[in-house]
Amino acid sequence: MHLTTNVLVELSPDGRQATATSKVLTPKPDGTAGVSRYEDSLVLTAVGRQIARHVVDPTPGPWRLPGCSAE
């Protein structure tokens, strides 16, 4: 499971391309979480917007979720 939040979509002036950035939180059984940033390049096609490029930038370190303990 993962949660995606803070999605920002920026369109090119012609509206045919876009960049979407977001933060991703991946809870783990021990109460920590992985945190990453996604950056997607989108292009407009005949069937709608498609992801042309997907980059995952992980934030190092174990992140403790509020209210969770390792016990």
Image (cartoon, rainbow, N blue to C red):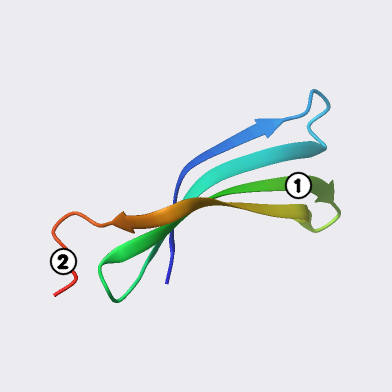
Q: Residue at x 35, y 71 (%)?
A: 28
- Residue 41 is left or right of residue 69, and the answer is right
Mark 2 residue crowding within 10 angstroms, few (<14) / some (14–19) / many (20+): few
Asked if residue 49 shows in the view, the reply is no
The numbered mark at residue 42 is: 1
Q: Quadrant of the N terminus?
A: bottom left
Q: Residue at x 13, y 59 (%)?
A: 67
- Mark 1 vs mark 2, foreground winner is 2
Residue 27 on image: x %, y % = 35, 66
Give the Cα separation between the discs numbered 1 and 2.
39 Å
Image vertical order of residue 1 relative to residue 53, above or below: below
Foreground residue among 32 and 18: 32
* Residue located beneath label 2 in the image: 69
Instruction: Looking at the image, tell me whether mark 1 or mark 2 is earlier in sequence order.
Output: 1
Foreground residue among 23 and 66: 66
Amino acid marked by disc 1: Leu
